[in-house]
Amino acid sequence: MGIHHGHILRILRDEGAQSRAELSRRSKLSATTLTHVTAALLRDGSILEGETYGANGVGRPAQAVRLVPEARTVAGVHIGAGNVQVTITDLLARPKASAAFSFDTGSADPDEIVRQVSRTVIQLAEETQVDTKSMLGVGIGVPGPVDPARRMALASINVGWRNLALADKLEDALRLPAVVEHNVSAMALAESRYGIGKNVPALLYIYLRTGLGAGLMVDGAPFRPGGHGAVELGHIQIVADGAECACGNVGCLETFVCERALMEAAGLSGQAPDDLLARVERNRPAWGTVVRHLTTALASAVNILSPNLIVFGGHLGEAPQSLYEALAADLPPRIMPHMRDILMLERGTFGAQAGSIGGAAVALDQFFYSGALH
Ligand SMILES: [Zn+2]
């Protein structure tokens, strides 16, 4: 595997165009190795070399090397509870085209979902005039933990899947390499590589849709304790004698802060969950419960995980500003003193496409910036 190629591609992604001298200094590669690596990348069109001028516009023009984001594409897939998003992106995870479809969680036949994902990728590729054979691969975000080699969804409780070899199935259907990741970890990865979390040492992403999930990036890598763990913030127990949770425990955060519980608490049952938290806010008792329990769980998460940044997605990303104000006021007294100055709270960068762009970010890491192509 072209480990040096991946290293050079990551520098160009993160730092922009560089002269060969700068690339050599940053990569610490010898001149001979760098020449060899850039020659291969120029040949396959991943990078371009052209003249650029110094920052002050004077002096001799220098040759700068830059990434060509349009050179290749990947597909990102987000599987949520009852809905699937698919996005084709370039090498900077910028969307070219997206589509979504829904499915019944009560009878979620994985083979049928894989066929539909496959058809959607092909259709989006046609629309954007991308040759599917030239795509680098597909990254799939799934609910719940994945296996260490990221080929399998281990336990997607809301969809009813266990030990499902999802990457193999999609590879068979689409004839493209595939990789599986926990869906909220994929969103955290996308924010860390391409969004608001660049250069942030520890980023915690919290996503609320049907359920409440979280993902943590530490020093540029997804946190995966034991090779399979996810950050199960939704299953922190808030009250010992609470309602039964889908995980088998009682009184978990998710029994209060999930779509169904929020709709019930705010008297919105049976309605579409659009603008959910703005509507819950109008019901003061329901809103007070959400803010209180979310603060309790976040305070525990911050004290255990010490994130520099918490990014909110899904309904939380669309929440009224008053939620952020409440958390900014209520969290600091409940976390370690040094964390009060460090912790930042932000809305996610990628809005409704966070999941599928997350999948694309996983595919880009696996099939391009790793140097796997070269
Ligand atoms: Zn639970």
Image (tube, rainbow, N blue to C red):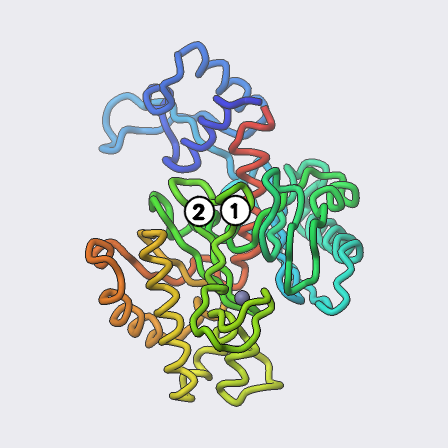
| Label 1 sits on residue | 93
Residue 88 shows up from this direction: no
In the rendered structure, are the residues bearing label 1 and label 2 in contact, judged by CB atoms less than 8 Å apart?
A: yes
The residue lying at 45 percent from left, 64 percent from top is: 236
Residue 270 position in % (x across, y down)? 62, 86
Q: Nearer the viewer, residue 16 or 225?
A: 225
Residue 194 badge: 2
Indicate the position of residue 24 as horizontal and vertical percent values: 36, 19
Q: Is residue 320 above or below residue 105?
A: below
Instruction: Judge left or right: residue 201 versus residue 33.
Output: left
The foreground one among 200 and 60 is: 200
Q: Is the residue 157 above or below the residue 125 in the image?
A: below
Identify which residue is drawn at 38% across, 35% down. Answer: 16
Residue 153 is at least partly visible in this image? yes
Relative to 194, is 175 on the left or the right?
right
How many angstroms separate mark 1 from mark 2 (CA)? 7 Å
Q: Residues within 10 Å of mark 1 (few under 14, many from 20)?
A: many
Along the viewing direction, whichever of 224 and 236 lies nearer the viewer: 236
Helix, strand or loop under label 1: loop
Q: Secondary structure at mark 2?
A: helix
Identify the residue at the far front of this view.
241
Which residue type carries mark 1? Ala
Q: Position of residue 148 (x, y in %)?
A: 59, 40
Question: Where is ligand 1, by quadrant?
Answer: bottom right
- First in sequence: mark 1 or mark 2? 1
Q: Residues within 10 Å of mark 2 (few under 14, many from 20)?
A: some
In the image: residue 154, left or right of residue 286: right
- Percent position of residue 235, x then y: 50, 64
